Image (spheres, helix red, strand yellow):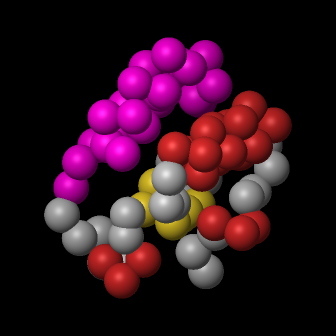
Amino acid sequence: MYRYAKDKCRANQSLGKGGLGVSESRCLGRCENGPVLVVYPDNVWYQYIDEEDIDEILESHLESGKIVDRLLIK
């Protein structure tokens, strides 16, 4: 999944405010929700399961500015 997310972000740099980046890390304080995707500077945290979830986050949140409620970590 990490490689997929990195490749998708690299191919869609125009969607990000200042570009997109993917960083692999250890626990970010929400390990029970992992894997997670964080959108900065919005500070919106998502849990994802598969490639379709990553695509939906990129298309809905970054392209259209709409939160993906079903994947949102509250």
**Is residue 18 among the parts visible in the rendering?**
no
Give the residue at x 81% y 37%.
Answer: 64
| Residue 23: quarter of image | top left
* Relative side of 21 to 42, left or right: left
Q: Residue furthest left?
A: 26
* Relative side of 65 to 33, left or right: right
**Is residue 68 among the parts visible in the rendering?**
yes
Residue 12 falls inside the magenta stretch: yes
Is 39 above or below relative to 44? Answer: above
- Where is residue 10 shown, x and y percent of the image? 43, 20
Give the residue at x 36% y 83%.
Answer: 32
Is 59 above or below relative to 27? Answer: above
- Where is residue 59 shown, x and y percent of the image? 71, 36
Give the residue at x 32% y 43%.
Answer: 2
| Residue 46: quarter of image | bottom right
Give the residue at x 60% y 51%.
Answer: 53
Image quarter (top left, top right, bottom left or bottom right) of the C terminus:
bottom right
* Relative side of 5 to 27, left or right: right
Number of marks: 0
- Where is residue 65 shown, x and y percent of the image? 78, 43
* Relative side of 41 to 65, left or right: left
Q: Which residue is at the front of the view, 4 or 33?
A: 4
Image quarter (top left, top right, bottom left or bottom right) of the N terminus:
top left
Residues in magenta? 1-25
